[in-house]
Image (spheres, helix red, strand yellow):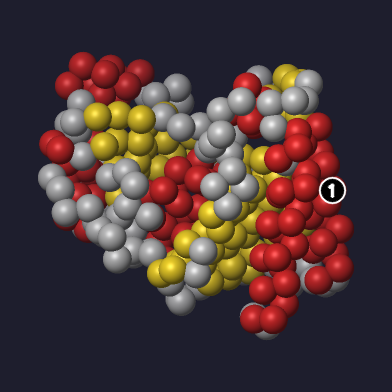
Amino acid sequence: MNQTTVSELKRRLVEAAEAELLPRFNRVAVEVKADGSLLTEADHTMQARMQGELSDLFPDVVMLGEEMDAGEQRKLLAAAERGVWVLDPLDGTSNFAIGIPYFCVSLALLVRGEVELALVYDPMRRELFEAQAGTGACLNGVPQGRRRPLTPLSRGIGLVDYKRLPAELARRLATAAPYSSQRSFGSVALDFCWLAAGRVHVYLHGRHNLWDYAAGLTILHEAGGHSVTLEGVSDPALDLAPRSSAAALDTDLFREWCAWLQIRPHGD
């Protein structure tokens, strides 16, 4: 990709998040969508702003946004010969609406089933996580993946979303957790980025969508991390079907985590 254009995109993404999200933080009315998730004015304004920016910089590439109709999303993903931008304008809407400062905007360029560029921006901390295919991941320009957590699972911190896990697995984790401490922050894209940065040790989520994970999971992989679905699929197709993820940055820790979860990644 043209690096000058990528730099301009990053600048516009940061400006958009700070202009559209920060002034509305904990100050907007909340709607409840049909699936029970929340929606605010900030979701709409950020999506509209980025749709304009992307059209200006990349007129031949379509954009798929979380707040689009499901039918429109399917058509865009199927017809995007030159690639498609996958945008979550506000990942962590529940946090944003109630005043918890853990949310972000997530953007990924998907070309022929692979993510070529991934950007996740946290405007509260002014942290821009980024990755391009095959070139590694960075946080504010600093390469990620060097801070590998050299700790056994028993002394680690697990970042786990219990709500969407199979009941028996959730029960095991609640009654006999293999790690020393557990967190649940509420933004899938940012969760993967924090894992890539070495801020937590293992991760588990039972169900998330393409716009939730496309950028963040790419950043984790480019940082040298590993992931697998609960069904053992290490590299599932990037499509609109929801999926699960178990992940870790460190290879040995990932294997230990999968063993405890009773996951055998396909091919192992």
Point 37% across, 49% down: residue: 195
Give residue 58's quadrant in the image.
bottom right
Residue 23 coordinates in the image, percent (x, y): 76, 37
| Crowdedness near tag 1: few (<14), some (14–19) or many (≥20) residues, C-alpha within 10 Å | few
Q: Nearer the viewer, residue 148 or 115?
A: 148
Please report the residue visible at 58 percent of the width from the left and 70 percent of the height from the top.
116
| Residue 256 shows in the view | yes
Task: Mark yes or no: residue 260 visible.
Answer: no
Relative to 148, 212 lies left or right = right
Q: Is 233 drawn above or below residue 114 in the view shown?
A: above
Q: Position of residue 237 (x, y in %)?
A: 52, 55
Q: Nearer the viewer, residue 141 or 161?
A: 141
Q: Which quadrant does the C terminus fall into?
A: bottom left
* Amino acid type of the residue that numbered disc 1 sits on in the rendered structure: Ala
Residue beneath the point at 41% across and 29% down: 184
Residue 87, given in percent of the width and then of the height, sits at: 69, 51
User: Which of the 4 quarters of the picture holds residue 146?
Assistant: bottom left
From the viewer's perspective, tell me whether residue 110 is left or right of residue 68: left
Residue drawn at x 41%, y 48% as measured from the top left: 194
The quadrant of the rendering that contains the N terminus is bottom right
Residue beneath disc 1 = 48
Closest to the observer, 237 or 18? 18
- Give the vertical position of 7 relative to 91 (above or below): below
